[in-house]
Image: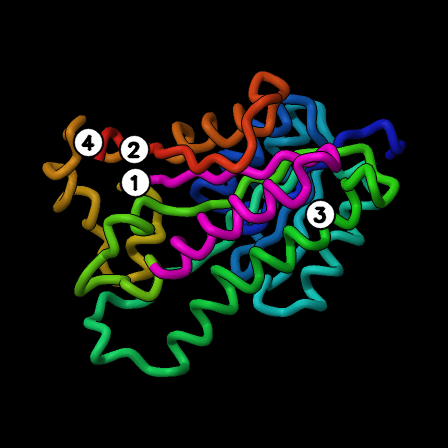
Amino acid sequence: MTDMNRVCIITGGSRGIGAACARLAAKAGYAVCFSYISNPDAASAVVADIEKAGMPAKAIRADVAHEEDILALFDAAAEMGSLKGLINNAGIVAEAQDVADYTRERLEKMVAINLVGAILCAREAVRRMSTKRGGNGGSIVNLSSAAAYLAAPSQYVDYAATKAAIDTFTKGLALEVADEGIRVNAVRPGLIETDIHASGGQPDRVEKLQHLVPMKRGGTADEVARGILWLMSEEASYVTGDSMNITGGR
């Protein structure tokens, strides 16, 4: 591949919102390099879809909780062309619990993936995209959550806290690199139909809670991805430091 390729890195790109972003990024003309953890078949299916769209794709097994995996992901992307975008999507929830029942191990894993990993990925993107560091500029979109302001009591307060931290990080980094050719924004998805709810022990969470949404339904991964790709695009060229709610009004 040539350096003329615009490359987008997506963490957690084999399923849900990440996979939807990967497919839309390819349609927008990006070569896509994405990470996955445990499902190579799903990752291969996303690669096949991107290649059908006529764009290069790589799926790299990488856990953002480990810095060496992050560096390997960015090295793989560098082989494809010039980094122009990062979608900081990888994240986890744990089993719904009261704070009084949390373990230290749960909290350390939550923060390592949802916060530290996202910041390290953004660091690597800035090092490559900053015009002050020899880059050509680009865009970072971080995945926050409506939980950042809803707080998820008796469910995922720790998850919500990491997403509130992502909002603050997004604003701070955006201001820091605003004159270096990099825009930094976030999206806050609401109740979205993905399998993250099953991983938290509540596969029917959307069905149970959609009555709380003014639009009376859960959102789709594609609806979130469209917002993310808009923020990545030149149509959002004067938008930075913003956190966009994609919540059906909640």
Query: Residue 96 or 172: which is nearer the viewer?
Result: 172
Q: Residues within 10 Å of mark 1 (few under 14, many from 20)?
A: many
Compute the Cα span from label 3 to label 1.
26 Å
Q: CA distance from mark 1 to mark 4?
A: 11 Å
Q: Is residue 167 visible?
A: yes
Residue 92: percent from left, percent from top: 41, 60
Q: Which residues are magenta?
A: 161-190
At x 43%, y 68%, the residue is: 110
Q: Which label is found at residue 200? A: none
Of the two numbered discs 3 and 1 on the same chain, state the one appearing first in sequence: 3
Q: Is residue 177 magenta?
A: yes
Three-letter residue code for mark 2 = Gly
Query: Cα distance, mark 4 to mark 3?
Result: 35 Å
- Indicate the position of residue 193 as horizontal and vertical percent values: 30, 40
Instruction: Work out whether mark 3 precedes mark 2 in sequence or the reverse, and give the earlier one.
Output: 3
Residue 210 sits above or below residue 98 on the image? above
Disc 2 versus disc 4: distance between alpha carbons? 7 Å
**Residue tagged by mark 4?**
217
Q: Nearer the viewer, residue 61 or 92?
A: 92
Residue contact between numbered discs 4 and 3, judged by CB atoms under 8 Å: no
Residue ID for mark 1: 190
Disc 1 + disc 2, Cβ < 8 Å: yes
